[in-house]
Image (tube, grey):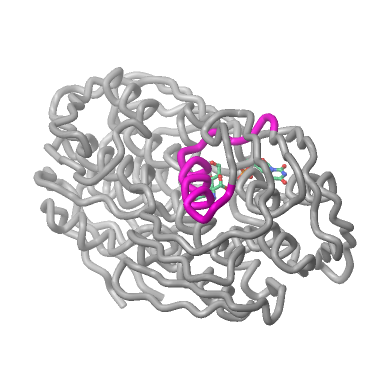
Amino acid sequence: MDKFAITGGTVLEGEIPAGGSKNSALPALAAALLTAEPVTLRRIPRVRDIRTMQRLLVDIGCKVEAEGETVRLETPAIACPEAPYELVKTMRASSLVLGPLVARCGRARVSLPGGCAIGARPINLHIFGLEQLGARIEQSHGYIEAQAPEGLRGAPVHFDRITVTGTEDLMMAAVLAKGETVLRNAAREPEVADLACLLVAMGAEIEGAGTSTIRIQGVERLHGAVHEIIPDRIETGTFLIAGAITGGDVTVTGCAPEHLGALVSKLQQAGVDVTQPGAGSLRVRGGGRLRSVDMTTEEYPGFATDLQAQYMALMTQAGGIALIVETIFENRFMHAQELARMGANIRWDGKQAIVAGPRELTGAGVIASDLRASASLVLAALAARGETVIDRVYHIDRGYEKIETKLARVGARIRRVE
Ligand code: EPU
């Protein structure tokens, strides 16, 4: 298993290009199952979760050709409408094939995801929504089987709670259903709007994506399309925090500043200088005294849970006390234990953590427990005195493309140990 060896204390300076959004690319790849015609996706990040999704699509009957960041997908017929446990257990986003499969061929068999490091993460809302659209769903042997031999029919669906992939799954099911579907209390994440943009390019009729009410008029069939994935706002945010935590001067280029309002606001309140030098770039300049600022995670446009761990690392270097509340997942403070091993002063209980700073961090051996927790350990290591060795960096490879290369180009002393 690979490790990262990071020697902290370098001030990061320079430009880092943003990659395409992993969480936008995953549903976009699944959407290719909705048509027999070729779908070409640009700016697909080369990360492990994307490779897992591509493997799943190949098993289902999709021809996948990747060249650099461009992926061409063609699914003349569905050979096997199934997502097996072996893949779903490694990546819950596999459940994104459920909606497209039922919509395209009236049948899907998808493994239930089981436990996850950051919380229970059930898919009951995906199932409920498909039932509203007329699918018959049965559960046995750890799998759910959905059937809609006569096709799905449009219906109103009100989500009990906001779910990102649930909204995406239902949107993909509804585009080929008969009649109108209205999704209420839908997720407003930019990734949902990006998926709608692709589906519309494929011939779907969708209004309101990016708001909490999405109206979908089902169409007979979809056609091929070419679509470019939006920049990854979580990767961008991670690099901005890297600039801030090292007191550096880092510009992320090719990003979408409009998707990062909540983080930019917190950074500014914490005393970091954040500017937008161009339409698609954000620059942070640290170096002054950092102030502690409380933060609560929320659905978009609130502060993203996927940046909570990285923000906690930053708060270890801020003067004062920061209360961090995680409202989306039940168990997303696993990085706190590791940050404490590096010298951070953190107390946590359930959904709340209190970080008192600034505390000098010192390099230590730490273990990455999930994707974003690993990113927070990388950030802490950049600010720490001495060397930190982060074990199990396969977690970070799930969602960050060559993070060590991108950080090294702005001066970080980081190397991958195989
Ligand atoms: N939930 C249910 N029932 C459902 C679906 C969700 O109770 O049927 C609960 C979840 O357990 C959670 C909350 O609702 O407590 C929100 O979950 P959501 O469904 O929105 O999460 P997700 O769609 O599974 C996506 C991202 C996550 C990100 C969350 C929240 C993808 C592929 N994944 O997950 O990204 O944290 O939204 O923004 O889009 C990551 O990239 O590191 C990551 C975990």
**311 or 276: nearer the viewer:** 276
Task: Residue at 53% x, 68% y: name it.
Answer: 53
* 44 drawn magenta: no
Percent across and percent down for residue 362 are: 27, 47
**161 or 241: nearer the viewer:** 161
Q: For this view, does 194 lie left or right of residue 289?
A: right
- Residue 150's place in the image compared with 321, above or below, is below
**56 or 90: nearer the viewer:** 56
Question: Which image quarter is the C terminus in?
Answer: bottom left
**203 or 313: nearer the viewer:** 203
Task: Residue at 45% x, 49% y: name it.
Answer: 373
Query: Within the displayed image, which quadrant is ligand 1 positioned in?
Result: top right
- Residue stretch in magenta: 184-204
Percent across and percent down for residue 22 are: 43, 55
* 191 drawn magenta: yes
Percent across and percent down for residue 286 are: 16, 30
